[in-house]
Image (tube, grey):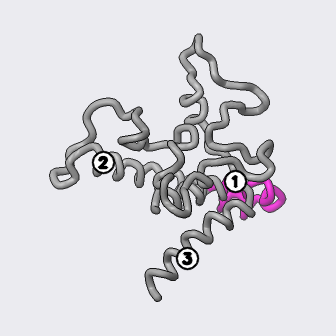
Amino acid sequence: MAQSFVDTGVRAYKGGAPILMPNKDILESALNIHSVEARHSSHVRTVRRAVEGGNPSNGTSVAGNLTNLNKIPKSWISGIDNGGASPDTTPSTRPVYDKGNPEATYPAESNTTQAGANIVNAAAGITAAAASEAFDEPLDPTTVKSIARNFVKSTTTLFV
């Protein structure tokens, strides 16, 4: 849940940046929050990596290959992150990483095109996964609200 929550925050703040452009003070604050959310996201994934791939009781880190998204999460989003932290739950976490609306403005995290150029370059060793990992993609307010409603429902249920 924490991973999905902070990853939604990263995309929400990036998606809101163009709307805040006229007010530089608010824009600066929002971009500062965006960077904090991104660090939180990385830390949550690092904790999950240690728990799922290492021995949390003695603090050992993960040994071996960290590229198997089915087993051990990276500290950053890769593609649509294998459908999210809990792709088989209801509701699914896939919308956190999927496209927004309109898709041309709010692409999925698997996007490999930046500033109109496809940055995948096999000769330079830039795979589609690596290209998608290089950027956070924005998310539109409607999709963010739809995802956020899942957290409100969960929290309300816990305390009722």
Q: How far apart are marks 1 and 3 (CA)?
A: 21 Å
Disc 2 and disc 1: Cα gap in Å? 29 Å
Q: Please give the label number shown on residue 139.
A: 1
Residue 115 numbered tag: none
Label 2 belongs to which residue? Answer: 52
First-in-chain label (2 vs 1): 2
Q: Please give the name of the residue rendered at 56% of the width and 75% of the height, measured from the top-left corner.
A: 152
Badge nearest the viewer, 2 or 1: 2
Q: Is residue 86 above or below residue 116?
A: below
Q: Which residue type does callout 2 highlight?
A: Glu
Closer to us: 102 or 14: 102
Residue 39 in view (yes/no): no
Could you give the CA–CA distance between mark 2 and mark 3, rounded to whole angstroms? 27 Å
**Residue at the (50%, 42%) spot, across then down:** 82
The residue at the far top in this view is: 123
Q: What element carries label 3?
A: helix
Among all residues in the image, which is located at the extreme left? 58
Is residue 31 placed above or below 111 in the rendered structure?
below
Residue extent of the magenta highlight:
13-31
Residue 153 shows which numbered tag? 3
Residue 19 covered by magenta stretch: yes
